[in-house]
Image (tube, rainbow, N blue to C red):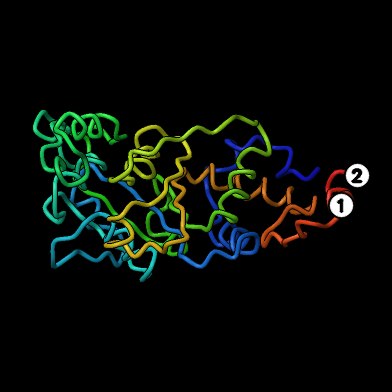
Amino acid sequence: MSETEEQPVHLRTGQMDWDDLLARLQALLRIRTTPIGMKLFATVDEMESVPRIRRPDDIHTTDQIVGMASRLNWTVGITRADLVGDQCGAVIGLHPQDEDWLSGERMQGVWFETLDDSSAHQEAMDCVPFGTYAAMAVSPLSSKRLDPPDICLVYATPAQMILLINGLQWRGYKKLDWGCVGESACADSWGRALSTGEPSLSIPCFAERRYGGVMEDELLMALRPEDLLVAVEGMEFLARNGLRYPIPNYGIQTDARAGLGVSYD
């Protein structure tokens, strides 16, 4: 084994070689949407010190801000005042998850039949606790302007995403469990990853597709930089076993033994 293969992951992620990591990720999955980083800041000054950062002139959803980085390759920073509503701010810890927010009143009759349903939805969301952070920024990982970001966001098709998940599980296997809050699915991805540190998969919601430019066939994985490295390394081992993207269709009426033999025999 090489030194990289032998060394525990947590000992080799102190300084990430983003150019190398992103090149390996692209070679493995051929991702069409720019992988980006997201970082929270305790002060606005810290956020505004990020090189070449853009500040919005208009009011946006967080989905739009994320889209500016992943679709336009921009580095963008925001505060609570830049966001259109409390829902966006609460997920990233810029608005309190207070009694009014937890009531879900604004969603009653829109996304949920009753106020009880709306309130249960708010309670189910994974959010960054309020009070620590004043700003957030997103940027393409390739720019290295948020080095290191708190989390990485990777948009991928289901076929690409399952291989990324398989890569995460190559070494130190554990079952990965996720939920779906429905609307406000950003709580399932960046909200959960920021608040728990766990790799977090989501089906992007209506708002992410309408306002954030997310394509119909894309899923979103939010994960720490060190977990992205784990996934890439795992996928490289899988590729050696013939388990790689794109996944060719073997044929539903073909004798499966020869195909399985490539990987298992």
**Helix, strand or loop under label 1:** helix
**Relative to 43, does residue 54 appear above or below in the rendering?**
below
Q: Residue at x 33, y 48 (%)?
A: 39
- For badge 2, the amino acid type reads Asp
**Picture coordinates of residue 60 (x, y %)?**
18, 60
Q: Are marks 1 and 2 in contact (CB under 8 Å)?
A: yes
Left or right: residue 39 versus residue 254 is left
Q: Residue at x 23, y 39 (%)?
A: 93
If the image is split into quadrants, where does the C terminus sit?
top right
Q: Residues within 10 Å of mark 1 (few under 14, many from 20)?
A: few
**Relative to 245, does residue 109 appear above or below in the rendering?**
above
* Real-space CA distance between mark 1 and mark 2, rounded to the nearest whole angstrom: 6 Å
**Picture coordinates of residue 78 (x, y %)?**
21, 55
- Could you say which disc has been placed on residue 265 in the image? 2
Q: To which quarter of the image does residue 120 belong?
A: top left
Q: Residue at x 31, y 56 (%)?
A: 208
Question: Which residue has dot 1 on it?
Answer: 262
